[in-house]
Image (tube, rainbow, N blue to C red):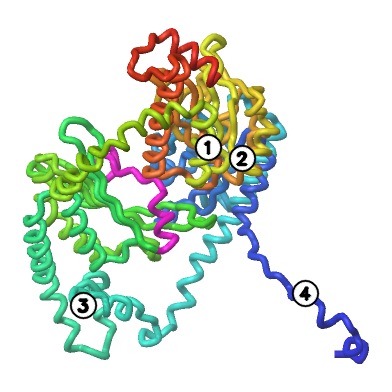
């Protein structure tokens, strides 16, 4: 250090350097492409040949990643032109839950030095032909992505050569230390997970052959214990708990679920779901996963189906290993499916799959028995809880309170309370639209009182009824939910506000709200739709439990509105039947 630097009085005030993780070249190029091409809302790159981690990078919305035909695509050299994009009318997978106009698939074969290194998948929301400048931008991006993918492929091919000279004794063995304290099954489980790892160990030659002849007997003993435990219970939830405890002993699953199918129609009749206590596992439980009779494991009659998928946990994209094991009945017909998910690198090992499959098979007779009897929940816990209810309803002071409270409520109180409850549930930007039956329009009625909601209100004009959508609009998610009278989810704000506002305005609203996902619940009073609640936008998608809570909340609001309108129309005579014309007039004045 020079004398001048020593005499400087500002050296101790210099801020330390902030190290920021650089964006990978493929993802950076995808973001540039997304900002350069209009009406392109998402793009992803799939490796060629496709491996366990097929998706190299993804940005924006990519419903095509739910289609295994595209993620496991093996393109010959003469299928598509090299580094040239083609727009196709490809069907959107139903797992993507797309609402609105179906997008177009933008696909390109990425070629570098005469070799196919990947496939570009894009999501276009326009039917207009691509312009010359747009095609030039896409083609240039394809060449840049192809060169980056070739660089990654070369690095992956050169990586194993650096590990050849590493001695076997120096390799880390985390499986033994991680599985040793688990339970008395741990020694057999580690041998099943890594059957070849016993050969290079010179430390304990006597213990090496012991697990191999005893592993099958240990599995049989474990299956017999599980079968005896299952035979002692008579409901699906209890069997699910037994299976969950067994999976905790033999696997490192972060999420566990059992889905039992209906006997007479292709849908799930009962689902038992458990996630870990840590934050990533809790977020993983909110991510949707197909475990219906149409899932891949059931449709292909496989003993199990293991695959990887990408999920967003706390703003970070992570790979999750998924295992689905069908529950087979007497005639080898699938009556359900067991789903396990893990964050562990590499997913589930082959020996682990055999062990899990044997345990699930041991519980299949019990699930078949309770499914045929329709016993999904325990009946013993419900009967004692139902006995105190008549005693609680007998006191005289409780009876007059039920009609008095709704009579004192007004439409303003009920709808404002609905927005307050939505804000407490995690959607502080929710808003309500009312149906104007004479004009056939859904008009903005009110919005939550948060700061973000105030910005959205200034932009859309919800509280001033400036925002209006035709109830017959085919592509608007709110209008569709009201027509079909069912709860729908919308992954983007554009599906909520089109055609009144374009995609750029929807992007601004998403930035104000800090998220894109919403749920629409129609408000039904006396069998008629009078409006809708839009819970969102927010960053996380509403899970099944949250959707059920939203549905119950809106149903209770419909009952409260019916009582309030009846009291306002007839002066509190709640026992008198009100004609439909009178209720319709009250709805038009109070909500629309």
Q: Are marks 2 and 1 in contact (CB under 8 Å)?
A: yes
Please give the range of residues in magenta.
Answer: 278-298
Query: What residue does disc 1 label?
Result: 419
In this rendering, the label closer to the viewer, 4 or 2: 2
Circle 4/circle 1 CB separation < 8 Å: no
> Residue 297 in magenta?
yes
Q: Is residue 104 visible?
A: no
Q: Nearer the viewer, residue 505 or 297?
A: 505
Q: Of the numbered discs in the image, which one, if any, rests on residue 187?
A: 3
The tag earlier along the polypeptide, 2 or 1, is 1
Mark 2–mark 3 Cα distance, whole angstroms, equals 58 Å
Mark in front: 3 vs 1: 1
Residue found 56% across the figure and 11% down from its top:
439
| Image position, residue 297 (x, y; %) | 26, 46
Vertical placement of residue 323 versus 216, above or below: above
Q: Which residue is mark 2?
A: 449
Badge 4 crowding class, 10 Å Cα cut-off, few under 14, some 14 to 19, many 20 or more, is few
* Chain-order first, disc 4 or disc 2: 4
Lower sequence index among marks 4 and 1: 4
Compare residues 69 and 298 and report the one nearer the observer.
298
**In this figure, what is the number of numbered marks?**
4
User: Contact, CB < 8 Å: mark 2 with mark 3?
Assistant: no
Q: Nearer the viewer, mark 4 or mark 3?
A: 4
- Earlier residue among tags 4 and 3: 4
Which element is circle 3 on? Answer: helix
Q: CA distance from mark 4 to mark 3?
A: 53 Å
How far apart in space, not on screen, are marks 2 and 1 (Cα)?
8 Å
96 in relation to 199, above or below:
above
Callout 1 secondary element = helix
**In the picture, residue 463 is in which quadrant?**
top right
For mark 4, what is the residue?
15
């Amino acid at each position: 250090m020079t004398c001048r630097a020593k005499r400087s009085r500002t050296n101790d005030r210099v801020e330390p350097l902030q190290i920021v993780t650089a964006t990978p070249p493929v993802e950076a190029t995808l973001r540039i492409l997304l900002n350069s091409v209009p009406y392109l809302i998402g793009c992803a790159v799939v490796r060629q040949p496709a491996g366990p981690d097929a998706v190299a990078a993804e940005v924006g919305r990519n419903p095509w990643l739910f289609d295994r035909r595209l993620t496991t695509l093996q393109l010959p050299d003469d299928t598509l032109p090299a580094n040239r994009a083609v727009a196709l009318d490809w069907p959107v997978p139903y797992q993507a839950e797309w609402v609105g106009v179906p997008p177009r698939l933008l696909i390109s074969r990425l070629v570098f030095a005469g070799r196919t290194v990947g496939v570009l998948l894009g999501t276009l929301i326009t039917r207009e032909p691509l312009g010359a400048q747009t095609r030039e931008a896409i083609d240039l991006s394809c060449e840049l992505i192809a060169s980056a993918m070739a660089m990654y492929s070369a690095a992956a091919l050169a990586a194993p050569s650096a590990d050849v000279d590493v001695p076997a004794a120096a390799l880390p063995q985390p499986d033994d230390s991680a599985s040793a304290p688990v339970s008395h099954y741990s020694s057999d489980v580690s041998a099943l997970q890594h059957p070849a790892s016993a050969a290079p160990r010179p430390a304990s030659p006597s213990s090496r052959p012991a697990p191999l002849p005893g592993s099958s007997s240990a599995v049989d003993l474990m299956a017999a214990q599980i079968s005896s435990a299952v035979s002692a219970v008579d409901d699906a939830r209890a069997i699910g708990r037994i299976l969950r405890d067994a999976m905790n002993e033999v696997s490192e699953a972060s999420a566990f679920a059992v889905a039992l199918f209906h006997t007479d129609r292709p849908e799930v009749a009962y689902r038992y779901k458990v996630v870990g206590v840590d934050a990533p596992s809790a977020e993983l439980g909110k991510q949707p996963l197909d475990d219906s009779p149409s899932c891949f494991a059931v449709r292909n009659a496989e003993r199990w189906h293991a695959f990887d998928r990408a999920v967003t946990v706390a703003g970070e994209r992570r790979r999750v290993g998924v295992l689905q094991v069908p529950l087979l009945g007497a005639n080898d017909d699938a009556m359900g499916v067991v789903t396990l998910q893990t964050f562990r690198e590499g997913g589930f090992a082959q020996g682990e799959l055999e062990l899990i499959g044997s345990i699930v098979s041991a519980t299949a007779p019990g699930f078949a028995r309770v499914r045929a009897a329709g016993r999904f929940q325990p009946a013993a816990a419900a009967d004692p809880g139902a006995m105190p209810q008549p005693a609680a309803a007998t006191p005289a002071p409780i009876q007059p309170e039920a009609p008095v409270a709704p009579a004192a409520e007004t439409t303003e109180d009920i709808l404002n309370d609905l927005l307050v409850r939505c804000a407490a549930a995690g959607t502080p930007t929710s808003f309500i639209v009312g149906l104007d039956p004479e004009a056939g329009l859904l008009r903005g009625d009110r919005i939550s009182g948060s700061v973000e909601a105030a910005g959205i209100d200034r932009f859309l004009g919800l509280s001033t009824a400036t925002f209006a959508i035709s109830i017959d609009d085919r592509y608007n998610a709110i209008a569709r939910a009201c027509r079909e009278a069912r709860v729908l989810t919308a992954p983007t704000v554009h599906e909520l506000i089109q055609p009144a506002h374009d995609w750029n305005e929807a992007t601004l609203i998403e930035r104000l709200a800090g998220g894109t996902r919403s749920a629409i619940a129609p408000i039904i009073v006396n069998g008629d739709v009078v409006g809708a609640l839009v819970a969102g936008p927010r960053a996380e998608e509403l899970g099944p439990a949250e959707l059920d809570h939203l549905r119950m909340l809106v149903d209770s609001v419909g009952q409260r509105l019916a009582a309030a309108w009846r009291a306002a129309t007839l002066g509190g005579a709640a026992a008198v039947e009100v004609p439909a014309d009178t209720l319709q007039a009250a709805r038009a004045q109070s909500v629309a």
